[in-house]
């Protein structure tokens, strides 16, 4: 395993500031769809970027203020719905995004060397907002940390109730665009409406949804350690060749199947135990009609593959890849509508009792961020979670880095099973 790096306390020269939209914005409330307001999405997606050269903070604040005129919901605040107290809505009140500036003595090279293994100390790189609940935290929190060598770490926390991975990438690219080309218009105008994703009346749950459970299952609590593995295009080709007979599949499908099987073997699960693989599928083009260009809200649903452990670990890649492909291909307009209607009854959460959950961060453009001083040397999460993240590899469009925290006793075996020879 590569070593990690413990982050010392950041030095804050001044209190964080609220950055508000520079232009006039609508003062209204935005409806959040059932895909936005799922109980398990009530957290912030936390991204970390490492840059070799820092960008002027005043320039970043000015461009953020300008881009928030277009992305004004990110300057608003979540609140309980006036019609249904269990549901959230977005008050577009232009209160602003929270922007913190900090200093740290480590170098870019020191951080880069250990960047594949986040640890809990990395959370110091993102300003902690004291709030009674998730609702009290601004939907957008940013920290720029100046490094001793002239480099910069940029961390963002974006409320998952407002954006999915595609949406956050769209916003971050827009911010970078305005920073480097302040007098130009955005290449993609954001679409704020969520009305296309309202439930049917009456609701019609027309599919089974094994990806959800009620009552909500609990993940087993144990000492977790992060495991990271990078896969090149040639290694993914080797994984595909393990499928006998061969099966046409994408790199994601092949790698997801490989990681699922490796996870089940590493945890040494009972052979008769049913296990699941949950992964996000972009529904923007599955819906009829499709969601408008620029839609940056949550436009994904969870696909679910199922198997008994003994079949999963004893079969070759063909069996597992076929399950992943079938789960992915099952996502249709009707299935998405059925999920939306199911979630109208606000008790369902993803089944995490014996499941591997994969979140796809690669192929979204997240790694291409450039605020004028060059692209990021590293892009990843602020912390490793129990969910498995497929990360982009900077400089290798076809590569993936798999990052996930697993029980300490299974970490070495998981690393070994992931390896492709």
Image: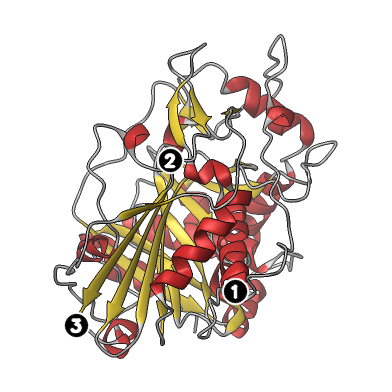
From the viewer's perspective, tell me whether residue 144 is left or right of residue 81.
left
Query: Between disc 1 and disc 3, whose residue precedes?
Result: 3
The secondary element bearing badge 1 is classed as helix
Q: Which residue does the image show at 49% across and 64% down from the upper left? A: 62
Q: How many neighbours does mark 2 have within 10 angstroms: few (below 14), some (14-19), or many (20 or more)?
A: some
Q: Is residue 276 visible?
A: no
Rendered image quadrant of residue 148: bottom left
Q: CA distance from mark 2 to mark 1?
A: 49 Å
Secondary structure beneath dot 2 equals loop
Residue 49 lies, in percent from the top left, at 42, 72
Report the residue marked by disc 1: 239
Q: Is residue 245 visible?
A: yes
Task: Give the residue at x 23% y 57%.
Answer: 15
Q: Which mark is residue 95?
A: 2
Q: Position of residue 190 (x, y in %)?
A: 69, 49
Of residue 34 and residue 296, the one placed in the foreground of this image is 296
**Which residue is painted at 35% across and 74% down in the image?**
153
Percent position (x, y) of residue 293? Answer: 77, 50
Nearest the eye: 333 or 33: 33
Mark carried by residue 105:
3
Q: Left or right of 414: which side holds 128?
A: left
x%, y% of residue 361?
A: 54, 62
């Amino acid at each position: 395993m590569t070593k990690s790096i413990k982050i010392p306390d950041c030095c804050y020269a001044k209190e964080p500031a609220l950055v508000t939209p520079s232009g006039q914005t609508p003062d209204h409330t935005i409806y959040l769809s059932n895909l936005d307001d799922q109980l398990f999405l009530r957290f912030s997606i936390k991204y970390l970027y490492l840059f070799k050269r820092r960008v002027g903070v005043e320039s970043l604040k000015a461009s953020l203020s300008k881009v928030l005129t277009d992305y004004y919901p990110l300057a608003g605040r979540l609140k309980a719905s006036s019609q249904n107290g269990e549901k959230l809505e977005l008050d577009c009140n232009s209160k602003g995004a929270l922007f913190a500036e900090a200093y740290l003595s480590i170098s870019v090279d020191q951080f880069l060397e250990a960047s594949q293994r986040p640890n809990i100390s990395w959370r110091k790189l993102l300003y902690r907002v004291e709030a009674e609940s998730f609702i009290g935290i601004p939907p957008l929190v940013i920290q720029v940390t100046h490094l001793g060598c002239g480099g910069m770490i940029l961390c963002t926390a974006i409320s998952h109730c407002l954006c999915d991975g595609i949406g956050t990438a769209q916003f971050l690219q827009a911010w970078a665009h305005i920073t480097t080309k302040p007098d130009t218009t955005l290449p993609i105008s954001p679409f704020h409406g969520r009305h296309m994703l309202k439930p049917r009346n009456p609701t019609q749950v027309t599919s089974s949804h094994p990806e959800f459970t009620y009552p909500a299952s609990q993940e087993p609590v144990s000492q977790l350690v992060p495991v990271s593995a990078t896969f090149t295009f040639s290694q993914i080709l080797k994984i595909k060749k393990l499928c006998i007979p061969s099966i046409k599949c994408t790199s994601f499908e092949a790698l997801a199947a490989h990681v699922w099987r490796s996870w089940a073997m590493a945890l040494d699960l009972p052979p008769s135990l049913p296990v699941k693989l949950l992964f996000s599928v972009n529904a923007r083009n599955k819906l009829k009609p499709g969601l408008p260009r620029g839609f940056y809200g949550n436009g994904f649903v969870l696909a679910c593959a199922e198997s008994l452990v003994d079949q999963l670990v004893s079969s070759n890649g063909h069996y597992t890849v076929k399950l992943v492909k079938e789960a992915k291909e099952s996502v249709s307009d009707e299935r998405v509508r059925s999920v939306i209607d199911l979630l109208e009854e606000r008790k369902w959460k993803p089944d995490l009792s014996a499941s591997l959950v994969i979140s796809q961060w690669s192929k979204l453009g997240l790694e291409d961020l450039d605020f004028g001083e060059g692209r990021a040397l590293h892009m990843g999460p602020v912390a490793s979670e129990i969910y498995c993240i497929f990360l982009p590899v900077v400089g290798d469009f076809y590569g993936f880095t798999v990052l996930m925290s697993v029980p300490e006793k299974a970490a070495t075996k998981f690393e070994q099973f992931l390896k492709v020879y």
